[in-house]
Image (cartoon, rainbow, N blue to C red):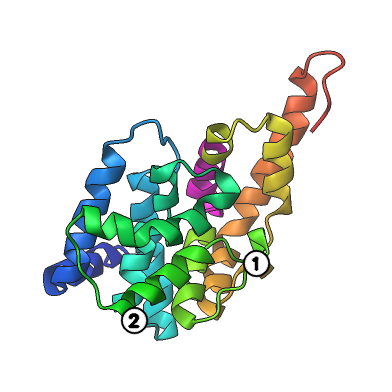
Amino acid sequence: MSPDIRQKLADYLANDAEFKQIYDYTRRRFEAVPELTAHNWEHAYRDVINSIAIGEAEGADMSIVLPAMVTHDIGFLYGATGKTHGALGAEKLAQFLQEGDIKLKPNKQSQIEACILTHKGSMHSEAPESLEAKVVSDADFLEKFGPVGVYQSIRTYTEFNYDVHRVVRNLLAMKDWQLQTKTGHQLAEERKQFSTEFAQALQQSYQVYAAEGTETA
């Protein structure tokens, strides 16, 4: 990922007052909930960086992608669990914006809601329809690959109280076919070998240390 992506984000924030308002408000909301150890602001920020790399390459409407990416996990702010947070986030977007005194045109808000609703893509048997929704889904899924991806995956599974066996199974099951765009596939290809090799090494090592009678990964 090119270092100038962060400068591109700074440029978007400087030139799009509406996006900056959503970005700043969402950041404050997530930073006020430290118990969200994985679905937190740090994760949202990395996803925004991913979305710029994918969205610009794919020619997506970044005025939709960026606010959708920033808010894609707000379902967790309203008590969602893993598989419900996309639906609840989309449902709560209007309330979230109202609480932040942020006003969007109805058409734009509905497009953002659609992105939030389907951002888990094929992982949750969802089908992003618009290019912008596909970019949001891919940017979030790309977070699962490479060294940072392994780090984020383990933090996520710990947040959901998954045991090590399920962590290994999920890491080994990660397939880049779940991505929706050509750029997403290309970026995942650069990172996925590390994720697979780490999961295999963890599986082998954990079998040595697992207590007698414990299910092997």
Of the image marks 2 and 1, the number of the one nearer the N terminus: 2
Local secondary structure at mark 1: helix
The residue lying toward the viewer, choosing from 33 and 8, is 33
Q: Which residue is mark 1?
A: 178
* Residue 147 counted in the magenta span: yes
Return the residue found at the far top. 212
**Horizontal and vertical percent position of residue 47:** 40, 58
> Which quadrant of the figure contains the C terminus?
top right
Of all residues shown, which one is farthest toward the right? 213
Q: Is residue 157 left or right of residue 18?
A: right
Q: Write down the region rendered in magenta.
A: 143-155
**Mark 2, residue position:** 107
Q: Amino acid at mark 1?
A: Gln
Q: Position of residue 39 (x, y in %)?
A: 44, 44
Q: Residue placed at 34% from the left, 32% from the top? A: 34
Q: CA distance from mark 2 to mark 1?
A: 28 Å
Q: Quadrant of residue 153?
A: top right
The amino acid marked with disc number 2 is Asn
Residue 204 image position (x, y, % from top left): 77, 32
Q: What type of secondary structure mainly makes up the magenta span?
A: helix
